[in-house]
């Protein structure tokens, strides 16, 4: 069956240390009518926070004021199923090699590293978390635009 897609939110932001929290809050607000379970809301919020943090820290090397966009869609299929959400975060910064993306999303949790000082280093932990929290994560870097796409089936 064909999925119908509905744009719920599309907004341009500017990179900053505060942007991850602002974007995560805006995404949750845009989804309020779907009455996400508390657990689902936390997962979506953390996933968006991590993706926007990656934009700021890696794509834009912690430079403030560079634009990026976030879009939120709901996808509907069969009438008896809850909607699926799709969130895109796109930037024009430094891209990532697909092999690096794949190695990060396939990482396993190492408790020693999570609890140690080394956990503050660039580790791919954010993408690993997003991969575990959401149903799907994809990355594309094309024509100077880097886009992360995440999806989650709502309960």
Image (cartoon, helix red, strand yellow):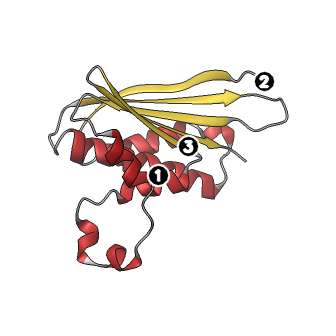
* Residue at x 62% of width, y 22% of height: 6
Task: Answer above or below: position of 45 versus 39.
Answer: above
Query: x%, y% of residue 97?
Result: 29, 40
On screen, residue 110 above or below 27: below
Q: Is residue 132 left or right of residue 56?
A: right
The residue drawn where x is 48% and y is 50% is 45
Q: Are marks 2 and 3 in contact (CB under 8 Å)?
A: no
Counting from the top left corner in percent of width and height, residue 56 is at: 24, 43
Using the numbered discs, state the Cα–Cα distance from disc 1 to disc 3 in whole angstroms.
9 Å
Find numbered disc 2 in the image and state the secondary structure of the residue it sits on: loop
Q: Can residue 16 be seen from the camera position used here? A: no
Q: Secondary structure at mark 3?
A: strand
Could you say which disc has been placed on residue 112 in the image? none
The residue under label 3 is: 136
Q: Which residue is mark 2?
A: 1
Asked if the residue under mark 3 is in contact with the one under mark 1, i.e. CB atoms within 8 Å, the reply is: no
Q: Earlier in the sequence, mark 1 or mark 3?
A: 1
Query: Tag 1, which secondary structure?
Result: helix
């Amino acid at each position: 069956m064909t999925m119908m897609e509905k744009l719920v939110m599309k907004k341009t932001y500017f990179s900053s240390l505060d942007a991850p929290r602002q974007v995560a809050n805006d995404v949750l607000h845009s989804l309020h009518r779907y009455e996400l379970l508390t657990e689902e809301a936390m997962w979506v919020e953390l996933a968006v926070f991590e993706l926007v943090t990656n934009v700021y820290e890696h794509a834009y090397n912690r430079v403030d004021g560079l634009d990026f966009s976030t879009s939120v869609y709901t996808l509907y299929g069969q009438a008896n199923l809850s909607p699926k959400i799709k969130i895109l975060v796109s930037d024009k910064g430094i891209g990532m090699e697909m092999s690096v993306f794949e190695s990060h999303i396939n990482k396993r949790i190492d408790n020693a590293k999570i609890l140690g000082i080394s956990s503050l280093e660039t580790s791919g932990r954010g993408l690993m978390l997003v991969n575990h929290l959401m149903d799907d994560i994809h990355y594309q870097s094309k024509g100077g635009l880097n886009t992360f796409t995440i999806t989650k089936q709502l309960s």
